[in-house]
Image: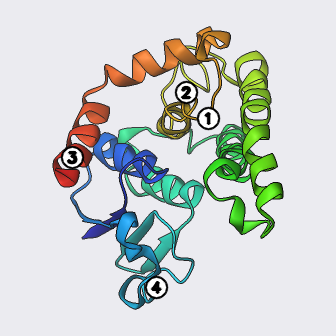
Amino acid sequence: MLTLYYAPNTCALASLISLEEAGATYDTVRLNFAESEQRKPQYLSINPKGRVPALATERGILTETPAILAFIAQSFPAARLAPLDDVFAFAQVQAFNSYLCSTVHVAHAHRLRGSRWADDEAAIEAMKKKVPQSVGDCFDLIEREMLKGPFVMGETYTICDPYLYTISRWLEGDGVDVARFPKVQDHVRRMEARPAVRQALALQMAAAA
């Protein structure tokens, strides 16, 4: 049995959607960030990083969204969530998800998590002010070069798509004008029409209620 540790409105949504797309049997454990449950000993014993998502498997705990998404795709090959029979194409999938994880998400985090990089209030405020530009620049590149359309890798849906959708949902909060990115907007609409996405969003809302 798989167990996904998550919190609403975080990047864990990508893993939740992918588990739904895969038709996996899984449990969920919701963490309350408002009460800092991710920093309490019980969760730190599961994920010492104190972040979500974490996926408990029969072989141990996995962390980091790109790794979890790849694990889901490889564990449920019949769902065809990645080009597993093409090593180069699969590497392209990994490259895109790594960009979201290491660059786009980090740029977004400067708005809410500036204290990770600085203690000075003025520096933290400066980081916040930079976010609309830094995140916007990332999405300029995605719109122009990386999102092939209609899905990230072209005609075929992959584990890139729930991850991009999850981060795209943060654009307005980051002060980025989403009208600049018509391909990304189309991608969001396509994603929200998928049953797995609707189910994942409903699960999050029910858990938060």
Which is more toward the observer, 83 or 36?
36
Identity of the amino acid at label 4? Leu
Which residue sits at x=48%, y=28%? 157
Kindly identify which residue carries mark 1: 174
Cβ atoms under marks 2 and 3 closer than 8 Å? no
Separation of marks 4 and 2 at Cα, in angstroms: 31 Å
Identity of the amino acid at label 3? Leu
Q: Is residue 188 left or right of residue 79?
A: right
Residue 62's place in the image compared with 145, above or below, is below
Mark carried by residue 203: 3
Q: Secondary structure at mark 3?
A: helix
Cβ atoms under marks 2 and 1 closer than 8 Å? yes
Separation of marks 2 and 1 at Cα, in angstroms: 5 Å
Residue 141's place in the image compared with 203, above or below, is above
Separation of marks 3 and 1 at Cα, in angstroms: 25 Å
Q: Earlier in the sequence, mark 1 or mark 4?
A: 4
Q: Secondary structure at mark 1?
A: loop
Kindly identify which residue carries mark 4: 44
**Of tags 2 and 3, which is closer to the observer?**
2
Separation of marks 4 and 3 at Cα, in angstroms: 24 Å
Q: Earlier in the sequence, mark 3 or mark 1?
A: 1
